[in-house]
Image: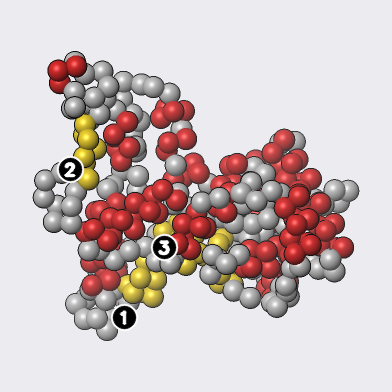
């Protein structure tokens, strides 16, 4: 079984770059094995982000780095930029992935596999929905984690999205019972069985929780059970789209971006080619003259690039 234990019940605290850049020796005690970012800043050019991270690698402060919740198109852009500009590249991607959250199967997982990136899937139990606790006919008081208890909307039984998740979780629990597995065993084995997934990040708070995760070690899910899973939650589908976490990394889905305006919203500067009269610049490896096309919509005919 491929699992990474996260000892925190809530989100991990930040690793501060000033702390990482102390000292000059490659044997510095501040060296970090892998620096895992959250979502790359949408207001910062990916070239600048990769340059800063590459400096940390060169200085021996980190050995490699990765990011989280990055759309497939931006993964490709980052790989292309690293190659053209001579930077170190993202080595890992950390997306949400579970039996209830399968959107990354459509393009993120194939993209990571194609570019040789490790995938550290987080929330394999879908925030507790696949713990076996959420079943129809069972009285559920809500999440026992103090951090999750603050996210009241995520577990509101009156929410249509949560009602759909309960239906799916109950059907998956019944399937696990039929297969002679716990729902946790089936959920963890499902995530780690995907050929693109390197490991699943788990966050047990108690020894009992850890034992329930470890019980998934060595579990193989039959093709028949996998087919039944696909009938409950189709490949590439997510029961509640909010669980894809696209609100963190995909500004193109915001209403302000999707509706034609005189200007794009903040945080979408990397998509400036969609604006009339703006140049979409692609720089070569030496960052000399920009090459590209000028968007001519709305310009007088004589000024449009032919």
- Residue designated by label 2: 291
Residue 282 lies in what quarter of the image? top left
Residue sitting at 45 percent across and 49 percent down?
71
Q: Residues within 10 Å of mark 3 (few under 14, many from 20)?
A: few
The correct choice, above or below, for 299 with respect to 209 in the image is above
Instruction: Give left or right: position of 47 versus 181.
Output: left
Residue sitting at 22 percent across and 63 percent down?
86
Residue 272, position as x, y percentages in the image:
29, 34
Instruction: Give left or right: position of 215 versus 115.
Output: right
Q: Residues within 10 Å of mark 1 (few under 14, many from 20)?
A: few
- Residue designated by label 3: 115
For the C terminus, which image quadrant?
A: top left
Residue 202, position as x, y percentages in the image:
60, 67
- The span from disc 1 to disc 3 (Cα, nearest Å) is 31 Å
Let me know if residue 63 appears in the view.
Answer: yes
Instruction: Give left or right: position of 248 versus 4.
Output: left
| Secondary structure at numbered mark 2 | strand
Q: Would you say the residues marked 1 and 3 are in contact, meaning their CB atoms lie under 8 Å apart?
A: no
Closer to the camera in the image, 292 or 32: 292
Let me know if residue 152 appears in the view.
Answer: no
Residue 255, position as x, y percentages in the image:
46, 28
- Residue designated by label 1: 29
Residue 271, position as x, y percentages in the image:
33, 37
Q: Would you say the residues marked 3 and 2 are in contact, meaning their CB atoms lie under 8 Å apart?
A: no
Residue sitting at 72 percent across and 72 percent down?
220
Which label number is shown at residue 102? none
Q: Which is nearer the N-term, disc 1 or disc 3?
A: 1
């Amino acid at each position: 079984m491929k699992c990474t234990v996260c000892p925190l019940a809530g989100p991990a605290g930040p690793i501060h770059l000033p702390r990482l850049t102390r000292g000059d020796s490659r044997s510095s005690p501040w060296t970090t094995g892998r620096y895992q970012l959250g979502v790359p800043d949408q207001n910062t050019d990916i070239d600048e982000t990769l340059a800063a991270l590459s400096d940390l690698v060169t200085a021996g402060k980190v050995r490699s780095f990765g990011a989280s919740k990055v759309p497939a198109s931006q993964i490709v852009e980052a790989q292309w930029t690293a190659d053209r500009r001579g930077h170190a590249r993202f080595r890992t991607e950390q997306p949400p992935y579970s039996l209830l959250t399968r959107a990354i199967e459509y393009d993120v997982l194939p993209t990571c596999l194609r570019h040789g990136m490790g995938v550290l899937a987080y929330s394999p139990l879908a925030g507790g929905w696949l713990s076996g606790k959420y079943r129809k006919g069972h009285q559920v008081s809500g999440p026992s984690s103090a951090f999750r208890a603050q996210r009241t909307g995520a577990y509101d039984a009156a929410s249509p999205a949560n009602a759909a998740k309960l239906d799916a979780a109950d059907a998956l629990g019944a399937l696990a019972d039929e297969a002679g597995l716990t729902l946790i065993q089936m959920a963890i084995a499902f995530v780690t069985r995907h050929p693109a997934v390197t490991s699943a990040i788990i966050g047990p708070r108690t020894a009992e929780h850890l034992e329930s995760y470890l019980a998934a070690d060595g579990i193989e899910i039959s093709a028949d059970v996998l087919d039944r899973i696909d009938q409950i939650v189709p490949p590439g589908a997510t029961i509640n789209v909010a669980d894809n976490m696209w609100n963190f990394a995909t500004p193109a889905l915001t209403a302000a971006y999707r509706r034609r305006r005189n200007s794009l919203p903040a945080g979408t500067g990397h998509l400036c080619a969609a604006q009339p009269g703006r140049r979409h610049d692609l720089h070569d490896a030496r960052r000399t003259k920009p090459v590209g096309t000028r968007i001519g919509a709305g310009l007088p005919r004589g000024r449009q690039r032919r």
